[in-house]
Image: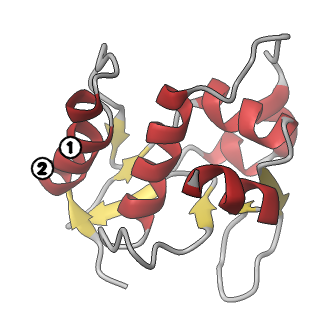
Amino acid sequence: MKKLRHHEALRIYHSELGDQGHEVAYEPKVQDETRSEAAALDWWLDKLDDGVGETPRTKGLLRTYLRIANGDNAVEAGDRLPAMGLRLEPRGRWHMDKYVIAKLYQKGLLAFEAKPQGMFEPAFVLTPAGKEWIEK
């Protein structure tokens, strides 16, 4: 799987959100280290509220994350998102929005796997309901 560079990931982010008319209010967080606390599902869920979650902006962010995690292959984007950050070249991790991921999990659009097959770290996985929702 091809890892993207930071500027390529930003292009996807702006394409999925800005070009679709959604607010691009901040520059996503990219750090050299993993977000180790994100390996625990409880960390993701600690600030959930009763918000809707299933918005066009949320769908744009999910599509962005899937494209970044799968080397910008929008047509055949995979269904797994490393919980501790999406890997970039030559190094660094794109940290996903905690609230967005938690809402998608809460709504049953993502599942959490502590040890997904073929991965060395926990990941969120698109559920059948999530696949259906993202394709609408």
Residue 62 image offset from top left, x and y in percent: 52, 46
Name the one closer to the observer, 105 or 132: 132
Identity of the residue drawn at 24% across and 66% down: 4
Residue 2 image offset from top left, x and y in percent: 29, 81
For residue 128, above or below residue 53: below
Kindly indicate whether the residue at mark 1 contacts the one at mark 2 (C-beta within 8 angstroms).
yes
Give the structural element (helix, strand or loop) at label 1. helix
For residue 20, above or below residue 80: above
Looking at the picture, which amino acid does disc 1 mark?
Leu
- Way the structure is coloured: secondary structure
Q: Dot 1 surroundings within 10 Å: few (below 14), some, or many (20 or more)?
A: some
Residue 72 image offset from top left, x and y in percent: 29, 68
Q: Dot 2 surroundings within 10 Å: few (below 14), some, or many (20 or more)?
A: few
Looking at the picture, which amino acid does disc 2 mark?
His
Is residue 11 rendered to the left or right of residue 23?
A: left
| Quarter where residue 73 is shown | bottom left
Cα distance in 3D space between marks 2 and 1:
5 Å
Is residue 105 rendered to the left or right of residue 133?
A: right
For residue 80, above or below residue 109: below
Residue 33 image offset from top left, x and y in percent: 43, 49
Residue picked out by circle 2: 7
Is residue 14 rendered to the left or right of residue 84?
A: left
Identity of the residue drawn at 65% across and 80% down: 119
Identity of the residue drawn at 68% across and 43% down: 38
Residue extending furthest toward the left:
7
Q: Is residue 130 visible?
A: yes
Residue 10 has which mark?
1
